[in-house]
Amino acid sequence: MTPTQTIPSPPEVVGRDLEPMFCPRSIAVLGASRREGSVGHAVLRNLIYGGYTGVIYAVNPKAKSILGLRCTPSLSAIDDEVDLAVVVTPPETIEGIVQEGADLGIRHFLIISAGFKEIGGEGAERELRIRQLARDRGLSIVGPNCLGLINTAVDVQMNATFATHMPRRGPLGLISQSGALCTALLDYAKGRGIGFSRFVSFGNKVDVTEIDLLRTLARDPNTKVILMYIEDLSAGQEFIEACNQIAQGDKPKPILVIKTGRTTEGAAAAASHTGSLAGSDEVYEAIFKQARVIRVESVGELFDCAEAFIDPLLPAGRKTAIVTNAGGPGIMATDACIRHGLTIPRFQDYTLKSLRFQMPPTSSIKNPVDVIGDAKHDRYRAALDAVTADENVDQVVVIVTPQMMTDEEEIAQVIAEIKGYSSKPIIGVLMGLVDVQPAVAVLQKHGVPTFIFPENAMRALSAKARYAEWQRRPISAYRQFEVQREAVAQLFDRELAAGRTQLVELAALEVLQHYGMATVPFALARSADEAAAAANQMGYPVVLKISGPKILHKTDVGGVRLNLITETEVRDAYDGMITQVHQHLGQEVEIWGVLVQKMLAKGKEIILGMTRDPKFGPLLMFGLGGIYTEALRDVAFRLAPIRENSARQMIRDIRSVKLLEGVRGEPPSDMEAVAEYLLRLSQLATDHPRMAELDINPLIVYGRGHGAIAADARVILKQS
Amino acid sequence: MTPTQTIPSPPEVVGRDLEPMFCPRSIAVLGASRREGSVGHAVLRNLIYGGYTGVIYAVNPKAKSILGLRCTPSLSAIDDEVDLAVVVTPPETIEGIVQEGADLGIRHFLIISAGFKEIGGEGAERELRIRQLARDRGLSIVGPNCLGLINTAVDVQMNATFATHMPRRGPLGLISQSGALCTALLDYAKGRGIGFSRFVSFGNKVDVTEIDLLRTLARDPNTKVILMYIEDLSAGQEFIEACNQIAQGDKPKPILVIKTGRTTEGAAAAASHTGSLAGSDEVYEAIFKQARVIRVESVGELFDCAEAFIDPLLPAGRKTAIVTNAGGPGIMATDACIRHGLTIPRFQDYTLKSLRFQMPPTSSIKNPVDVIGDAKHDRYRAALDAVTADENVDQVVVIVTPQMMTDEEEIAQVIAEIKGYSSKPIIGVLMGLVDVQPAVAVLQKHGVPTFIFPENAMRALSAKARYAEWQRRPISAYRQFEVQREAVAQLFDRELAAGRTQLVELAALEVLQHYGMATVPFALARSADEAAAAANQMGYPVVLKISGPKILHKTDVGGVRLNLITETEVRDAYDGMITQVHQHLGQEVEIWGVLVQKMLAKGKEIILGMTRDPKFGPLLMFGLGGIYTEALRDVAFRLAPIRENSARQMIRDIRSVKLLEGVRGEPPSDMEAVAEYLLRLSQLATDHPRMAELDINPLIVYGRGHGAIAADARVILKQS
């Protein structure tokens, strides 16, 4: 590795200031309505009954008052600054309202009404005009076609939605692309006692995007955990940057994401061509990995993970102690622990001694500790104190099943107390729904994450452990290598000028060389003499391949000779090849010459690739050669540019990485070299937007410290 | 395939009659106590307050009455037949009680008390004596160390447990090895409104096993779905047989199983040796597949699946229609559908027409159907009627999110109505916990499976679809091939008599031949002439390998010559080899001769193996050769004997089966031949318990119709 320069991450981009949207001193509701059951009524009611601390202006030219509030006939009639305009009028009126509002100096709009992009035609055109208006006038617009937004902060208390529930105050900030899902989430959260700081449904994102909202929630002191439901991302690298900045800031926050639409486009992707393996979900998977966000599969998992993160204390590692009053659930917890990548440590001798002394003889004192069915809070206390103090333990899961003797509420008190002074996360699993309810309330009150089943607890703790590891392992830099950027640009100019978008092998390998990648020694010979000289220089054995702008299937026309070991063989092969190719393709076929290549020593075959996602840009691919990539689809993707960590992690992502780590006594492969090639490829892809596709297939990788060599490559340029 | 005989499954084994245990006309409670908070008090209270319809005798020599019930001083003082004795006395008294009860003619005992095997020492010995007593006197004993049993049947209403909750009456039968888990399950079930038919915690299973209980629940008309929590199985093949009989009987019932302890022993297994890949959980996984039971990972998943099975109607296939009033949850449901192996069909034209006519223009009429947020029950009815009638649809999932206009209860009524006349399963997903509660109650009342999240619904429906497929695909027979069983027995006699437990290649291949498996042509030559003759007969190229009882590392001593293509080469190789082996190992080394083997044409390399699980018997293994089995652990297991379906399914179990189906234009491999080899291997393993291990590595498989040939084999016999 010889990087010449390490450029730091770009400085923090503050992003748009959307605070007036969430903390307005005054709100105008356009379309406020007297009619119960209408959205215009519900929004106004929620603002009033939700306890909003600012001034509300109900704009309605026809009504005198609504819900006791004196109406204002129009925006212009308001003799006050309006921080936020909430718009629930019919869609065709909205362009005019935004225009008028902007003229009056209003900068923030929340458009709840539907009837835009989602209905197509005139609706879509309307939406484009409003977008233009926002850009021209410097406005911030959330929506249209959304549920609205909520801020539970004591000094704001704004419920600008038409949902039936105002959520409890709590540490979760939620950003959702689906409004309908939000009503379900609010109902579910109410039943489960989950509280929110800010809650925003952003709908069609005519202007404000999920990334703007993410940055806003990251700055909100009341938001400790960010939950996102998205159906698409507005930008890939921008999302990665925003998340990385949040992770690197002085108040990092975990980001939990549900991204739907996993299966639709992925199925359409053709599986035969390595480049086309990147179905759209694979791009999202790559983005989420680079962004270091926690992707979850379902709403249940989203709230389970959120529950774990409610306690800001992070575990120092994955070593998990389990204390239970029932054997079966202890085994289930152990299984779930291992399944989700956590570990079950052995206790230190002093812990075992302490437990042996304090527990009844029939209890199990190894991890998991079974305090057995008749345990009351005192025995739980003894066990918890002992295992929490053990230096082999990073976190503790306490399982309580409601047995005849169990004093669940007192046990919950003990857990809360110990959590109060322990430096390690403690998590409660209270199995049941009825008898355990008072105990659950105690734990919730004290901020102890609480679950019904060990399986859910362990899955969530695994996500938290991963997050903790990210926090300990700083985000690495982007590396810049010293390369021949201009030479590649000229090469592309030359090829495009000659009308070629698919580069021949010779040119493709030259591109790699310009970016510091080792390629198989090759030379273009125009005579048998030149071929012999080149072979003598690079050493035997060599391969000869015919080279010409139109000769694609070289083997079929006698254009490939392998394993030549003497100068005579090379000369004979050269002459024979030229004759044979002419026989096949006629005398007029253009032949540039014969490519003389050194035959490489055996190593592991790897494929590196680059394609361009139409939305997110250059996508890098890594996989093992042969059936691993094509048949088993065991490949990893990242969006370029990639950071150093990403390059290394990308290699570890594939299941068959075991083959690079060395199996059956083979030495491990030079994965550092592969990582460097990925970084160089990333730079190449970023530097040259004209390059549409690139495949290095195969890259031959040797044992650790012995590097890698590109044996063949293919580059496709964009038709400009 | 040339089977000569197909033997039918064994006739149904009725199993033990445990009905008097679940439907006793009279119960004696030994250890009934006045002391509140004691187990003896709780059991009696539960029997009385639970509404037990028979006679209860409270046996207590010291108390006059408990809970209004006049006590009996001893068992012998009861002037009535006692169908069931429930024992909650101290452990050391119990042997005497069982003895006395048996003398008095009592046949069924439920021992709730702990203090047996689980504490070791004297407790374990006590348990063994009670087991012996049960066998000697023909008793049936459930327990000890358990929660007890419950039968909610109207004419019984027996709660013989010390749990605080009597469950609702319902269609679920539960068998649990953990008593403590049961209390948690009862509490959870109460909160979720889940009902049980029978509920039994079997503890240490001194006598009655989970298989006895399984058969009992299978016969119970009130039990529609069987749920099992187990930590081990008493017997493998017996469990498979019992489950297969239940599946083939006239009233098949789904069996859902949680088996814990997935990870403990599996981790200990050495990964390098193919045979040792069978960690104990892999055996269980094999058993559950052969038994066609649905294995779940968690209690949450258990009850989710049970919810789906509450409706006995099975889907005709995996084609799932989704109707939703919110786009986001519709996408989530689609993702979950595909992820769990269900499919999203396209609707027929008439369905699309009908929907286009009845739905508002902005709704999406393709699958998933989005009836949009303002849909009330009438629009849901129209959509449901249309998609339910579509012949491309096997089942329908209805998602309801609580929006402002949503009349959830009326929608639930519509769903229940349509479910009443539809021949296709309909499932409700009511997202939320509070507003949707009345609607949930309506669906529950009408037996419509109901979930909170689409993810959970789809996972459960996937299990049900699998079960429905099993029902449509009858369990196949065991095949018996005509084989040289006696010849193999004699071969084993001969080898063991000579003190050899590891068979040399020659003998191992002979064993395969006796069981009708093709092996690489081979001959043992004792001179260069014999070697040349053998080679001429089998055709070139050939391989020579030294053969002798003590020569293990043949290559190291010059004992292997590959790719010999002429008679001269064979003769030279023979002589050279003998000389070289003597040089390496001395003149006195015993040489049987030289093995002449035909070199096989290239094909796919497969490994078939057999080991003996110490508890469950012969275990068959299948995997691809090379790194697939060793590094990627991509292998499948089954317990022998296996049925025809199992052999085929076993091949499809591995991820890398794609390589056998033909990738990159290769023809598909002869998987029928591999299946037949597995069946023959199964017969071999079953016929010869002296065979401890067998590996065929590799078995070379050719294209479809071209068979397979064992190229090398290894057999290890038990030291007898």
Image (spheres, coloured by chain):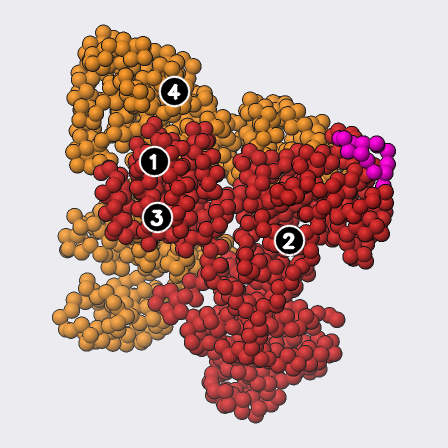
Chain colours: A red, B orange
* Direction front: furthest residue: A79
Amino acid at dot 2: Thr
Amino acid at dot 1: His
Category of crowding for the residue at label 1, using alpha-carbon neighbours closer than 10 angstroms: few (below 14), some (14–19), many (at least 20): some
Label 1 belongs to which residue? Answer: A377
Q: Tell me where the magenta segment starts and ends, as one range.
A: A61-74
Q: Would you say residue B308 sits in the magenta stretch?
A: no
**Precedes in sequence: disc 3 or disc 1:** 1
Local secondary structure at mark 4: strand
Q: Is disc 3 on the same chain as disc 4? A: no
Disc 2 is attached to a residue of which chain? A
In the rendering, which numbered label is found on residue B151? 4
Residue at horizontal 51 percent and vertical 59 percent from the top:
A634
Figure check: A530 above or below B616: below
**Precedes in sequence: disc 3 or disc 2:** 2
Local secondary structure at mark 1: helix
